[in-house]
Image (cartoon, grey):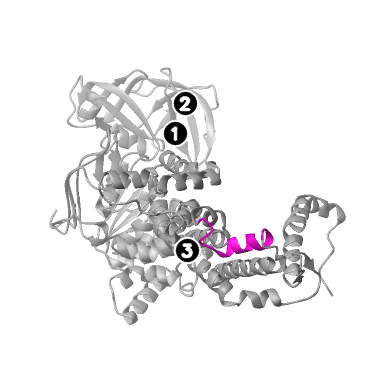
């Protein structure tokens, strides 16, 4: 005999009222579009750039074509490098902020956020102006005699990388800051008290306890930098192509929606994979408790 | 004291303009259970943290076994701390938590296992070694924290209000367990608390602190029965304290004039005209419907205060002071609003000298 009793109708109402709008929103604007993207990715491209509703895996085989595969690898590499550098710069940064008094920390966070209140196109354009051949940076370098002739910074992989890092840094700093901030000072004192020097304390206590923040930072920097196309478009001048640019171009000028959709699906899969690893990881942690 | 295990000489601590510990001198014997007792902000925790190495003394000398340690980092000191909030490592199991100090010291694995399990047995946490701190109750967490510190066999164990977060019953039980553990292991304990009952139960000696200074350092019995200052008398137990001036001293019995009336107290070494304090515990205070020789304290019974094991009677004196006496049963001989004479046996009261500190204040 089942012990389950159906919830009474009047108890269900508040639940529907609470979860309903969110569910409707998620289904309308996340689930359906995502399913549509997956659907399109298995269709064929028409002669005039339209979508022909015939099943085909052509788009997926195109992805494996060396030209595209190279770009995907390059994007993964760039996103990976951006993430690693954001962590290396962001962690000490977050640590310093977290150890400051609350009011100072709030100010530092604000300073970190200010660039993000400016329009991203304007920000990227100003980068171009700063670093162009006749820009202030080059003028300074030439006039002070550090270099003979202007360095071509813009439209290079390096500038794109720097652009990505500056773009992503706050997303790395904020989650790490929030976990480091919660790390109790007495934890570190207890470790020192038990004979651990600061380095050992960092490796055995600080890092493991703040790992959830580090993982959030990885997800929050890796995934967007994999898909971002504005930075590469502007600072790379169309010469530096990442997966995001290709997707944008497939939906835009090239008009090969199925291929764009297939590439999007690839991004979604990578994202889900990361989140899956994260939840698995969190679950293992929980299981050890019991 | 011969070979004290810990010595503090003229230790000072200032946080900016805040003078938290003032010229502290302290000697602690090996195997002793010393409690630093005082209200919050008296500098007791800061003193403990200076011994542990978490705070740097502004000036002064701290020695462990005769060796100066002020310049050593916490991880170089042979003392261990039990923290108020336990400070257990949440990502480690109970076993890993307790083993942490030994692992750092690279003790062989087999020995770690033996020592940790022995320690867990001692704090009655066998079978819990695979749990994470989150899955433990407050009392269990506290035991882990104690085991984690003691497994390192420190010279001195520092405890910062370790039982503060536990409920009363568990706290009382842990007090006795801790005291037994300390006796068994023979490790010196320095215990910080603001709970006077805890201090009286557990300590060999109590140092009562106030405003960064030690007011009195003595055995619990001595502190309870012979408080050295007005502050100590007021802080320990429930006492009625009178401020007055000696008007007559004869055969070790002083007549003291206060603004509530005259009273008697036993005391040597006081001279006529000297300002002083008299402390009388509520259990020794008595009332009578007729005047008692030597006492002119008259008051009005205010109300009864039921406290379970005792019932207190509050009496208002004409100067506005309220005195209380306690009995196991409610005092049936008086009723609120009744005029009574307050007295006691002079040998039960404590005569307290006015300190230089008070003169300054």
| Mark 3 or 2, closer to the camera | 3
**Between A99 and A289, the one nearer to me in the picture:** A99
Mark before the other along the chain sequence, 2 or 1? 2
**Between A216 and A29, the one nearer to me in the picture:** A29
Residue B135 in view, yes or no: yes
Mark linked to residue B325: 1
Quarter of the N terminus of chain A within the rendering: bottom right
Q: Secondary structure at mark 1?
A: strand
- Name the residue: 75% across, 65% down: A35
Query: In the shown orientation, is residue B246 left or right of residue B92?
Result: left
**Between B261 and A95, the one nearer to me in the picture:** A95
**Between A257 and B148, the one nearer to me in the picture:** A257
Query: In the shown orientation, is residue B67 left or right of residue A66?
Result: left
Highlighted magenta segment, given as a residue range: A237-253
Query: In the shown orientation, is residue A5 left or right of residue B9?
Result: right
* Percent x, y of residue B141: 46, 62
* Percent x, y of residue A82: 46, 61
Label 1 Cα neighbours within 10 Å, binned few <14 / some 14-19 / many ≥20: many
* Percent x, y of residue A156: 44, 59
Find residue B121 and report its image quarter. Answer: bottom left
- Name the residue: 34% across, 82% down: B110
Q: Is residue B245 magenta?
A: no
Callout 2–callout 1 Cβ contact below 8 Å? yes
CA separation in Å, label 2 and label 1:
8 Å
């Amino acid at each position: 005999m089942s012990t389950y009793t159906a919830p009474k109708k009047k108890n269900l109402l508040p639940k529907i009222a609470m979860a309903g709008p969110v569910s409707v929103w998620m289904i309308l604007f996340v689930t359906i579009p995502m399913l549509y993207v997956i659907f399109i990715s298995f269709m064929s491209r028409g002669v005039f750039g339209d979508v022909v509703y015939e099943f085909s895996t052509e788009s997926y085989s195109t992805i494996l074509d060396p030209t595209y595969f190279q770009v995907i690898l390059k994007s993964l590499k760039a996103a990976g490098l951006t993430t690693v550098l954001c962590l290396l710069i962001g962690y000490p940064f977050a640590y310093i902020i977290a150890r400051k008094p609350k009011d100072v920390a709030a100010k530092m966070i604000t300073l970190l956020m200010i660039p993000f209140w400016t329009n991203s196109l304007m920000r990227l354009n100003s980068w171009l102006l700063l670093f162009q051949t006749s820009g202030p940076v080059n003028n300074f370098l030439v006039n002070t005699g550090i270099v003979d002739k202007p360095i071509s910074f813009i439209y290079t992989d390096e500038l794109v990388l720097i652009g990505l890092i500056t773009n992503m840094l706050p997303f790395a700093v904020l989650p790490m800051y929030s976990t480091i901030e919660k790390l109790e000072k007495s934890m570190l004192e207890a470790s020192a008290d038990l004979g651990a020097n600061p380095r050992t304390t960092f490796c055995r206590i600080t890092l493991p306890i703040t790992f959830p923040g580090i993982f959030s930072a990885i997800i929050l920097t890796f995934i967007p930098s994999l898909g971002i196309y504005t930075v590469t478009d502007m600072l790379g001048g169309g010469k530096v192509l990442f997966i995001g640019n290709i997707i944008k171009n497939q939906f835009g000028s090239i008009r090969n929606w199925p291929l764009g959709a297939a590439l999007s699906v690839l991004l979604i899969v990578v994202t889900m994979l990361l989140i899956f690893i994260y939840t698995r990881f969190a679950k293992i942690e929980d299981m050890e408790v019991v | 004291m011969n070979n004290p295990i810990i010595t503090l000489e003229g230790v000072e601590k200032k946080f900016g303009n805040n003078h938290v510990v003032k010229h502290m001198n302290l000697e602690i014997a090996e195997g002793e259970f010393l409690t630093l007792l005082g209200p919050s902000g008296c500098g007791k925790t800061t003193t403990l943290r200076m011994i542990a190495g978490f705070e740097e003394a502004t000036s002064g000398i701290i020695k462990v076994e005769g060796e100066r340690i002020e310049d050593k980092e916490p991880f170089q000191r042979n003392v261990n701390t039990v923290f108020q909030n336990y400070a257990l490592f949440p990502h480690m199991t109970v076993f890993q938590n307790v083993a942490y100090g030994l692992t750092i010291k690279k003790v062989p694995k087999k020995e770690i296992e033996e020592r940790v399990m022995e320690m867990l047995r001692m704090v009655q946490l066998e079978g819990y070694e695979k749990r994470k701190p989150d899955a433990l109750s407050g009392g269990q967490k506290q035991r882990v924290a104690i085991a984690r510190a003691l497994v390192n066999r420190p010279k001195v164990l520092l405890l910062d209000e370790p039982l503060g977060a536990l409920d009363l019953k568990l706290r009382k039980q842990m007090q006795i367990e801790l005291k037994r553990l300390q006796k068994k292991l023979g490790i010196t304990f320095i215990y910080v608390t603001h709970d006077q009952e805890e201090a009286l139960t557990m300590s060999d000696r109590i140092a009562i602190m106030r405003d960064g200074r030690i007011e009195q350092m003595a055995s619990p019995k001595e502190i309870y029965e012979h408080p050295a200052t007005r502050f100590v008398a007021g802080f320990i137990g429930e006492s009625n304290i009178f401020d007055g001036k000696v008007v007559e001293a004869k055969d070790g019995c002083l007549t003291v004039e206060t603004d509530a009336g005259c009273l008697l107290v036993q005391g040597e070494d006081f001279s006529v005209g000297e300002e002083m304090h008299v402390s009388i515990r509520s259990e020794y205070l008595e009332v009578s419907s007729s005047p008692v020789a030597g006492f002119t304290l008259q008051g009005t019974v205010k109300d009864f205060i039921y406290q379970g094991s005792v019932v207190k009677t509050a009496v208002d004196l004409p100067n506005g002071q309220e005195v209380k006496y306690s009995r196991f049963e409610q005092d049936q001989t008086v009723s609120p609003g009744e005029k009574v004479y307050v007295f006691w046996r002079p040998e039960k009261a404590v005569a307290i000298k006015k300190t230089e500190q008070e003169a300054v204040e």
